[in-house]
Amino acid sequence: MYSSARTVPLRAAAAGAATVERTLRRRGGGGGQRRRRRRRTPATRTTSRAVSRAADADADDEVYRVMSRNQELSVIAVRATKLVSEAQKRHRAAPTATAAIGRNVIASLLLGAFKGDEETVQITFKGDGPLGQLTAVSDNLGNTKCLVGNAKADPPLRPDGKLNVGMAIGKGVLSVSRSHPSWVQPYNGQVDIYTGEIAEDVAVYMRDSEQTNSAISVGVQLDRELTVIGAGGYMVQVLPFASDETLDYLEKHIPTLDSPSTMVESGLSAEEIAKKILGELGAFKEVETRLTPKYGPCSRTELEGRMLKAIASLGREEAMKIIQEDGKIEVTCEFCNEVLVFNEADIEKALREI
């Protein structure tokens, strides 16, 4: 918990949130990267904003994909307030850890949603910061989950009052793995961590490892009570035949937008966020797609089989030794923080079925 001496901005600035990394064009080795300036949020809230937040709390999470009217851009927008809130609660995460977890979960949805059947994407940050390893996994249906080495990591705020996700992650390596049950082996890509702020790093990965120029923004906002009040993100991918006029418009238009977490907190749907991103370019709605993301799968039925296999892999002698000493075996899922307890009969059954 934060002590009363710790200054937590009104939005807990988890915000560090809305960092946008634009690698829309290749310019030498730099990729044309810029960051958008963030607006300062007024310290007071109007009644209408309070009503908006109440309505947003009941709004469903969504992942929405659409193309621009000229079919030169593909946009995926995500609202994930409930999803990130669940991840925060499952991992009992501190504010900075919550921001990092939320951003990475949203990034994995941006890369994993709408892919081939049963395809999954895993994004892992292995930095030298206090957060430790940060991993998020999403599939094509929007199922997502995460794990974090140290959910209590909460370094000092940045000079601008934002949560310091970059310091929490530190320097190291970003790995992205795409896999499918039918593939002989997963496709793995790796780049050095660029800033640790998630959006920049994933955009650099997309440019360098998948040769895709993208604009990516992910964000999480917390209030004074450290409740997640807005979480969202978007990815704009530039198709190979995009015109200079389209790129010029996009590069001028994106910096004028609010952060995705601010747009979500104000009550915008994923579709409305996508429309704001496209602006005058408009949407080609004939090819729109949407899905509802959820945390998991984490039901006992889905976890039990995997956990019993893990216990059985210890071998009969080791498994029964634990049963004799403790009378049970407890297994914790690092992604869900669910604890399952197995007795001798459960273990015997699992050993017979191997």
Image: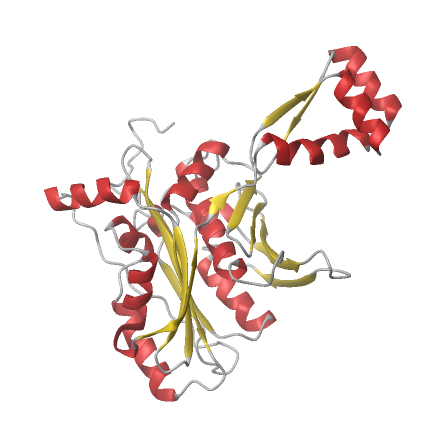
145 sits left or right of 70 in the view:
right
The residue sitting at 28% across, 39% down in the picture is 223
Instruction: Give residue 57's quadrant in the image.
Output: top left
The residue sitting at 68% across, 58% down in the picture is 180
Q: Position of residue 344 (x, y in %)?
A: 77, 16
275 sits left or right of 306 in the view:
left
Instruction: Give residue 184's quadrant in the image.
Output: bottom right
Q: Position of residue 257 (x, y in %)?
A: 27, 65
Name the one closer to the observer, 296 or 220. 296
Name the one closer to the observer, 325 or 35. 325
Residue 225 against residue 221 in the figure, above or below: above
Toward the left, the furthest residue is 47
Name the one closer to the observer, 162 or 308. 308
Name the one closer to the observer, 120 or 353. 353
Looking at the picture, the colour scheme in use is secondary structure
Toward the front, the furthest residue is 286
| Quadrant the N terminus occupies | top left
Toward the right, the furthest residue is 317
Q: Position of residue 93 (x, y in %)?
A: 45, 35
Residue 71 against residue 19 in the figure, above or below: below
| Quadrant the C terminus occupies | top right
296 sits left or right of 182 in the view:
left
Q: How many marks?
A: 0
Is residue 146 among the parts visible in the rendering? yes
Residue 293 against residue 193 in the figure, above or below: above
Is residue 194 among the parts visible in the rendering? no
193 sits left or right of 32 in the view:
right
Q: Position of residue 114 (x, y in %)?
A: 52, 62
